[in-house]
Image (cartoon, helix red, strand yellow):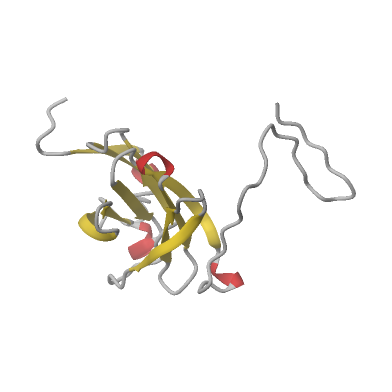
Amino acid sequence: GIRDTSVTGVQTCALPIYVTQTVDSWDASTDQNYGAAVAFLNGGDYMLSSANAENTGKVFVYIKDSNGQYQELTSITRSDSGLSGFGSVLTASNSDYFAIGSPDSNTNTGYVHIYKIDTALGTVALVGSAKTGPSTSSDFGRSLSFSKDGLWLYVGTPGVNRVYVYGDRKSTR
């Protein structure tokens, strides 16, 4: 199990796992909050990591290579009006879809952007967005969760005590 083994103010943790790789961004400076949110998709073949303090924010997309190591595939930035903290929240399905939350945007109204990875081409495309929550300070996108199959997206909006459920139009479950 997990136990605290602090020694002289240094936090360590005894886990039945070990570090196999550290992933650093080559283009996010140390004050840009790299690693603020992390998510995995498509069975762990891809990893997302954000630097939500870099300008309006940036999300890095990594692909696992044949040696099991993550290599940067691309990075995503946005310039939407009022955008702030892009990548503060990340979620991914076990398919090819992922969502990026920016709840501090537009006076905490919030934005959510939905992307899809084309695994055959290794490309990432924006497939949808909800650019405003219901009201100022609603914190739309403060929490996000995809269903395992990627057909449903749940968007937490704690400023108005609500969760929005978005479904694929073809899905009736």
Q: Is residue 7 visible?
A: yes
* Residue at x 32%, y 50% (from the top left corner): 99
Question: Could you tell me how many numbered marks the image carries?
Answer: 0
Which quarter shows the N terminus? top right
Above or below for 167 versus 102: above
> Looking at the image, which is closer to me, 112 or 118?
118
* Residue at x 53%, y 67% (from the top left corner): 25
Which x, y percent locates residue 90? 41, 50
Q: Which of the 4 image quadrants contains residue 156?
A: top left
Residue lying farthest front?
66
* Residue at x 40%, y 66% (from the top left corner): 84
Above or below for 23 versus 160: below
Which quarter shows the C terminus? top left
Q: Is residue 143 visible?
A: no
Which x, y percent locates residue 64? 45, 51
> Looking at the image, which is closer to me, 100 or 42?
42
Residue lying farthest right?
8
* Residue at x 42%, y 67% (from the top left corner): 57
Which x, y percent locates residue 147? 30, 34
